Image (spheres, rainbow, N blue to C red):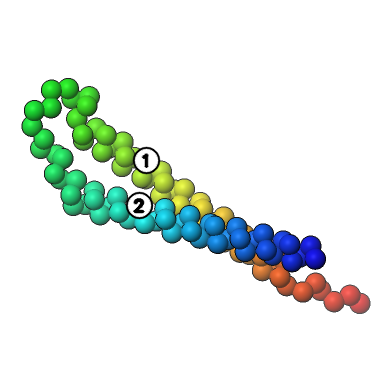
Amino acid sequence: MKNENAQRYFNRTIRLLQQMASLLAKTIDAWNKFRDGDIEYFSNLEGQQDRSQHPSRFLLAVDRHMAELGGLLSSLNDQKALLQRFSEEVRAPPPARR
């Protein structure tokens, strides 16, 4: 019974981690596509009086945050793999007694 409860917990948690990793990867991918293309529309904005409020400043901050999210995605995938290994160990039958 304990193994069944642990297995259900592992399965639910693994599914959650997979969903989180997928959404995070899509978010990072969307940012990278924007950064490599449409971000150029913001590079030559005229009439910005206050340099501290220029869009490029904010876009650089978003880019730094996206890089941090990339590191978190890697960590999330590592945790998911670790949990999958634990799940396989719980699922495995106990060694035979002699």
Of the two numbered discs 1 and 2 on the same chain, state the one appearing first in sequence: 2
Q: Examine the rendered structure and indicate whether residue 60 appears above or below residue 27.
A: above
- Left or right side of 57 for 76: right
Q: Which residue is mark 2?
A: 28
Instruction: For mark 1, give the secondary structure.
Output: helix
For image coordinates 37% across by 45% down, the residue present is 67
Residue 83 figure quarter: bottom right
Amino acid found under the numbered disc labelled 1:
His
Query: Tag on residue 84?
Result: none
> Residue 43: x, y in percent?
14, 39
> Residue 44: x, y in percent?
10, 37
- Contact (Cβ within 8 Å) of mark 1 with mark 2: no
Amino acid found under the numbered disc labelled 2:
Ile
- Left or right side of 75 for 10: right
> Residue 60: x, y in percent?
27, 37
- Judge whether residue 82 can be spotted in this image: no
For image coordinates 42% across by 53% down, the residue present is 24
- Judge whether residue 16 can be spotted in this image: yes
Q: Examine the rendered structure and indicate whether residue 39 appears above or below residue 86.
A: above
Q: How many marks?
A: 2
- Left or right side of 37 for 64: right
Query: Tag on residue 65?
Result: 1
Instruction: For mark 2, give the secondary structure.
Output: helix
Who is closer to the viewer here, 11 or 25?
Answer: 11
Measure how far apart labels 1 and 2 are at the Cα level: 10 Å
Q: Examine the rendered structure and indicate whether residue 5 appears above or below residue 64.
A: below
- Left or right side of 10 for 35: left
Residue at far left of view: 46
